[in-house]
Image (cartoon, rainbow, N blue to C red):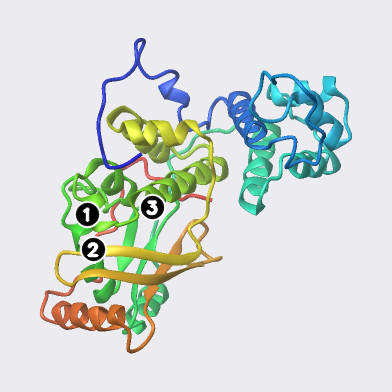
Amino acid sequence: MRGTARASLPPGGLPSLANVAGMKDVRGEVREFLTTRRAKVTPEQAGLPRYGGRRRVTGLRRDEVAQLAGISIEYYTRLERGNIRGISDEVLDGIARALHLDEVERAHLLDLVRMANASPVVHRRPARQQVRPSVRRLLDSMTETAAFLRNGRLDILAANPLGHALYSPVFDSLASRGPRRPANLARFIFLDDQSPQFYRDWDGIAHAAVGSLRAEAGRAPHDRTLTSLVGELSLRSQPFRELWAAHDVEYYRSGIQPFRHPLVGDLDLEYDALEIPADPGQTIIIYSAEPGSAAHQALGILASWAATQPRAGRLNTAEPPDGHTPG
C-alpha cells in the first residue's frame, strides 16, 4: 500500500457508512475486532499442535480460542457475535491472552465493552475544544524541539514556531484544513498527493494514523466530527478504507519518523507523545534530534527560517459547530 490513490467504490457502495466509525453498531464492531484478531494468531503462536490436513481458517478457530481462554465454545461464539454485555474481567483477560492482544488492543476491547454496557446517550451540543494558556506556554518553552498539540481526531490545535516550520507542508495543504477547521493530519496523509514525499515512511504513518483514529472511535463513540472525518476519508481514499477495514488500533507514542522536508531535505527525528491528563484527548507530539547530528543541524536551519516568519504558533483552533472533545 502506498500513496493517496483514490478509487471507485465497489459495487453497492461503501457498506454502512453511517456506522463506519464503529460508534453506533457496537455489536458489529466487536465482531469485526475479535474475528480480525483471531485471524492474526496461528496455532503455532498459540502453542497448539497443528494436525495434518488443510485448515479452513488462516488463524485460530473459535473452539481453539475458547479452549485457550478457558470458556465454552458456545459462550465465545456468543461473544464474537457482539453479545458482550456483562462480560467479566476474568473472561476478558482470558480472551486477551488467547488472542495475544497488546496493551493498545486490550484497551480498545475494554472501550468496546464500556460502549456495550453504557446507558443510551442523550446527544447534546458539546463544548468546543480549547487550548489552555499554560499548554501554549509549555509549547513555546520548547525552543530546540518541534512540537505541536493535537486531539484524538488528529486535528493540530497549536504548535510552537519550530513545529509549525517542520509541519509547514501540512499547514499549507488545502486538503488538510478548511476556513473553519484546523489542519488535520489524517486528511493530509490520505488526501494530499504530497504526503508520500513529506513522510518517507508513508505506509508506517498511514497505519499509525488509522490505528489512532480507530482507538479514538472506541474512546469517543459519540463524537460526530470523528464520524464525519472517518466517513469522508472512507469515501475519498482507498488506502484508508483498506486500513480501516483491518480494525487495527495503535498509539503514536515514541520512535523515529523519517521526513523529507522541502526546505532542509531528509531528516530522521525522534518523536515522543505526551498526553495531557487534564485535557482528555489532547497530546503534545515532540520531535527532537541528537545534538551534533545532521538532523539537529536541519532543525537549526528550520528554526532560523521560522524566526523570519510571522508568528505561527498560535493557530486558529476554531472547530465546526458540532465539534466534540474526545475522551
- For mark 2, does the 10 Å Cα neighbourhood hold few (<14), some (14 to 19), or many (20 or more) residues? some
- Identified by mark 3, the residue type is Ile
Question: Can residue 119 be seen in this snapshot?
Answer: no
Find out whether the residues at labels 1 and 2 contact each other: C-beta distance under 8 Å: yes
Q: Amino acid at mark 1?
A: Gln
Q: Quadrant of residue 92?
A: top right
Choose the circle earlier in sequence order: 1 or 2. 1
Compare marks 3 and 1 and give the one earlier in the sequence: 1
Q: Quadrant of residue 101?
A: top right
Q: Which residue is mark 3?
A: 205
Task: Name the residue that disc number 2 marks.
Answer: 260
| Residue 59 visible at all | yes
Residue 190 % position (x, y): 29, 42
Q: CB under 8 Å between callouts 3 and 1? A: no
Q: Secondary structure at mark 2?
A: strand
Q: Is residue 217 above or below residue 293?
A: above
Q: Position of residue 251 (x, y in %)?
A: 52, 55
Disc 3 versus disc 2: distance between alpha carbons?
13 Å
